[in-house]
Image (tube, helix red, strand yellow):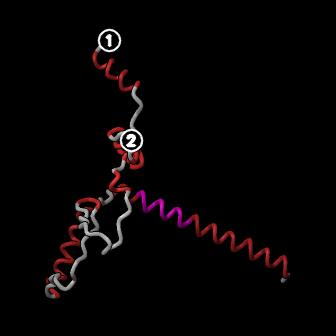
Amino acid sequence: MSEDGEKDKERADRPSRPDTAAARRARRASADRKDTPAGVGAGRSTESTKRPSPKGKTSEKVAKPEGKGAPTPKRNRRDAKKGSLFTRIGRFIREVWGELRKVIWPTRKQMVTYTTVVLLFLVFMVALVAGLDFVFLEGVDVVFGD
């Protein structure tokens, strides 16, 4: 058997790893549990499971979290430079132009196809509403007589 055949067989024997956010969190949690001894918080450190003391009740300084778990810092709106009206308009136009460059524009063929689908759907809906209108009009004539 060739090396490629053996690799394919090994891959087939291994279960595939699900690629969802929940699956990744579960893998990380199980990896954390493997690193710690049994009965010690099941993957969490004992410090994170302790309740924080109310402010002013402890002499310990609590360090603010940094990095990904840290809250987003507040912005001081007074310090932000607004700039003149023309500067803001120019920045707005540059940002709009930048966003328009990111748009994936349809080709002519796609545009014709999309337009045809929309027009056919519109004709169908107009016919459906007209048909229901006629049916209800006849039903009202039958019930109330003319």
Q: Is residue 15 above or below residue 128?
A: above
Q: Name the chief secondary structure element in magenta.
A: helix
- Residue 24 is left or right of residue 141, and the answer is left
- Few, some or many C-alpha atoms within 10 Å of disc 1 (few <14, some 14-19, many ≥20)? few
Residue type highlighted by circle 1: Met
- Residue at figure coordinates x 15%, y 86% from the top left: 86
Q: Seen in the image, is 115 located left or right of residue 94?
A: right
Magenta part of the chain: 113-123
Residue 23 - label = none
Distance CA(mark 2)–CA(mark 1): 36 Å
**In the image, what residue occupies the spot 36% across and 55% down?**
109
Closer to us: 25 or 55: 55
Left or right position of 56 against 18: left
Percent x, y of residue 114: 42, 59
Q: Earlier in the sequence, mark 2 or mark 1?
A: 1
Measuring from the top left, give residue 61's x and y in whole percent.
Answer: 23, 67
**Residue 120 drawn above or below residue 5:** below
Residue beneath disc 2: 30
Among all residues in the image, which is located at the extreme bottom? 85
**Toward the viewer: 73 or 64?**
64
Residue 15 or 131: which is nearer the viewer? 15
**Percent x, y for residue 77?**
22, 83
Tell me where residue 99 sits by quadrant. bottom left
**Residue 135 lies in magenta, yes or no?**
no
What secondary structure is found at the residue carrying circle 1?
A: loop
Please give the residue where the numbered disc 1 appears in the rendered image: 1
Amino acid at dot 2:
Ser
Looking at the rendered image, the disc whose residue lies closer to the viewer, 2 or 1, is 2
